[in-house]
Image (cartoon, rainbow, N blue to C red):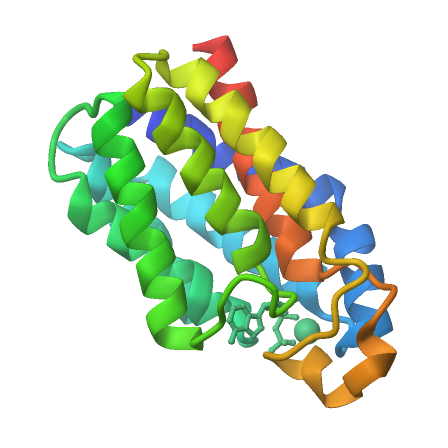
Amino acid sequence: MDIDLARAWVQAITVAVGQHKDYLTQLDSAIGDADHGTNLDRGFTAAAAAVSDLSPETVGAVFTNTGTTLISTIGGASGPLYGGAFRALGKALDFPAAEPLAFAEALAAGLDSIQKLGTAVPGDKTMIDAYAPAVAAFKEQARQGAGFAAAAAAAADAAEEGMRATTPLQARKGRASYLGARSVGHQDPGATSTALIFRALADTAARA
Ligand code: ADP
Ligand code: MG
């Protein structure tokens, strides 16, 4: 992971979120308030613009800027959660480039940030259900000596599996939890956007 890849990832997330904006909002209309797609589209469009104006000297500077922008532009729960995660990534990556193991540690710091703020655990039907297995998969690949693109591809696969596994769960955090048992049978919007974020990383790394 270097500065160019960091920037390209933020831009790829923005494109993916733009393409899936209506889908994310549709998922959020079933078990939330129908704003997840528009929230993330607004946030990442602003983040991509901010990052392209930046002359960062570290990978972390790209992510810190992204996180700050997400926090200030997204109104919903996902703004502080994703914003805090990117800021944690930024803090952990105070270098011009990062090896897969260092990036795995940074992803874990992002997960910690989401869990400290939102207090969700795996199985609560949130973005954690996609994020946690993605971090575990990335770390496992990195430990085995895989390159960045291979680790990112494994993380994206794990995130998508975690995303699909949210469907039968009952929500215990966030707006969807107000629905109780009626939240069962719907895929979680935040787990879906997390899967998009990791797929964007895998695609960007594969092109680098
Ligand atoms: P809001 O719920 O405020 O409308 P969004 O619609 O943008 O915000 O985001 C909803 C998503 O945020 C949910 O699908 C879920 O994945 C995630 N989420 C909500 N609360 C939490 C939490 N406490 N911890 C982790 N993720 C959460
Ligand atoms: Mg919502």
Specify whether 137 is left or right of 84.
right
Residue 56 appears at what percent x and percent y? 19, 35
Residue sitting at the far bottom: 178
Specify whether 156 is left or right of 94.
right
Residue 23 appears at what percent x and percent y? 82, 52
Can residue 16 be seen in the rendering of this structure? yes
Residue 142 appears at what percent x and percent y? 32, 22
Q: From the viewer's perspective, is residue 112 above or below residue 152? A: below
Residue at image coords 50%, 49% = 131
Residue 40 appears at what percent x and percent y? 59, 58
Q: Looking at the image, which is closer to me, 34 or 172?
A: 172
Specify whether 206 is left or right of 93.
right
Quadrant hosting ligand 1: bottom right
The C terminus lies in quadrant: top left
Residue at image coords 85%, 61% = 26
Q: Quadrant of residue 27?
A: bottom right
The N terminus lies in quadrant: top left
Q: Looking at the image, which is closer to me, 55 or 66?
A: 66
Residue at image coords 28%, 47% = 89
Residue at image coords 75%, 66% = 169
Q: Quadrant of residue 138?
A: top left
